[in-house]
Image: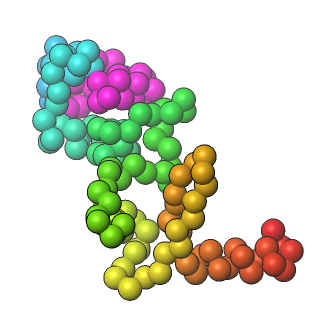
Amino acid sequence: MISKNLLFLRKRANLSQEALAEKLDVSRQTLAKWENGESVPDVIHCDRMAELFDISLDDLLHTELDETGLPPRGRFVFGTVTVGEKGQIVIPVKARRIFHIKPGDSLMVLGDINQGLALVSADFFLEIAQQMKEGKL
């Protein structure tokens, strides 16, 4: 995925391979290999590219850019979780940080037979339910 993203971002920024290679302090041949998927950049170069293109390192490495060339904002893939014997799951640290989930917080588990499960803040769910009751939604 990084090779496709790198190629797309370079072209969107209207940079030649030579120009981007110079900014990253690598040869044009090295950059060409990254774009062709023949090799991958090290973490330092990935970090530089993410900063240069103003996207997160995670998006550069793991997100398929949409038709606008940007990662979908506000949408995340946090990876998989394992369901324990009693149905418990551990919410990934990154998700807890982004959504400010702390020990003791209440989450509402919603389900749709076709779409799957969703977790939302219990406070948010109650607020929406109240607005629906009042006819505001």
Q: Is residue 56 magenta?
A: no
Colouring convention used in this rendered image of the protein: rainbow
Q: Is residue 11 magenta?
A: yes
Residue at 81 percent across and 68 percent down: it is: 137
Q: Quadrant of residue 86?
A: bottom left
Residue at 48 percent across and 51 percent down: it is: 75
Q: Is residue 9 left or right of residue 136?
A: left
Q: Is residue 40 left or right of residue 136?
A: left
Position of residue 42 relative to residue 17, above or below, is below
Q: Is residue 59 left or right of residue 132?
A: left
**Magenta-drawn segment:** 1-24
Residue at 31 percent across and 56 percent down: it is: 81
Q: Quadrant of residue 87?
A: bottom left
Q: Nearer the viewer, residue 24 or 133?
A: 133
Q: Nearer the viewer, residue 7 or 23?
A: 7
Q: Quadrant of the N terminus?
A: top left
